[in-house]
Amino acid sequence: MTIRVLHVDDEPDIREVAAISLGLDSEFITRSCGSGSEAVAVAAEWPPDIILLDVMMPGMDGPATLARLRASAITASIPVVFMTARAQTRELDLFRSLGAVGVIPKPFDPMTLAASVRSHIEPVDGKLARLQSDFLHRLDNDVARLKKLARDLKTGTARKASLKQIGEIAHGLAGACGVFGFPHLGDLAAELEQTVYDGGVGADHFGNVHRSLDLLLAGVTARDALENLVP
């Protein structure tokens, strides 16, 4: 996925540094403008996903440029982030009242500018949804690994190594399941982890591990545990 970023600043040096900084994110495609009037024209011809707009510019300043952008149906909905050294609370409230989605203070950190811009593109709830989706894919992979390790235990294949891997997977799930809304699975994973590390290599110990593992796998496949999961 590519993200179009339009950066507007009347200072050539700042535009150059910003271009390099934004280039640290491989998904960003950046264009630069030296004035508000140029930005209005470029945004209409090359609609960006976000505009970084300097506040203090000669001629058409940042607020005036934003007003022009909002007046056109083509550019009205493009998110705009002001970049300014004037970052007092009063100014921040004013900029947001004008329709800006946020403010990045100047001078900015070249190493974190791209991350700051991305935080204004992807809202928190979108990030959480993406993280949950990543977790669910991880859960699928962990379940597949646990099933294979369970078979290895039954056949006697590298039992100590299999137990170690089961314990590591269970430890990870014990911490993550509750965070993503599945505390019951987290409890079952914690129980499995504890069973693995209780020690022993005899039949009784392996039997206890199998029982705890079966409970966790059953919990993953249970309708009530997975009703909110997405493919």
Image (cartoon, helix red, strand yellow):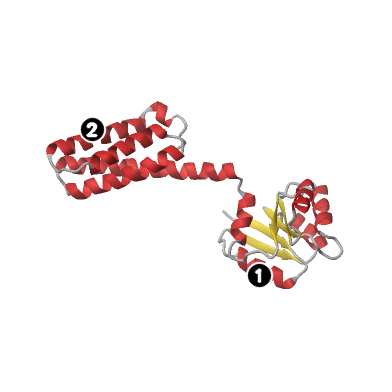
Residue furthest left in the image: 202
Q: Relative to 86, say whether 229 is above or below.
A: above
Position above or below: 170 against 41: above
Residue 172 sits in quarter: top left
The amino acid marked with disc number 1 is: Val
Q: Which residue is mark 1?
A: 17
* Of the image marks 2 and 1, the number of the one nearer the N terminus: 1
**Tag 1's secondary structure?**
helix
Residue shown at the point (43%, 43%) measured from the top left: 135
Q: Is residue 3 visible?
A: no
The local crowd at label 1, few if under 14, some if 14 to 19, many if 20 or more residues have their Cα within 10 Å, is: few
On the rendered structure, is 50 left or right of 112? right
Q: Residue at x 46, y 39 (%)?
A: 180
Q: Which quadrant of the view contains residue 210?
A: top left
Q: Secondary structure at mark 2?
A: helix
Callout 2, which amino acid?
A: Arg
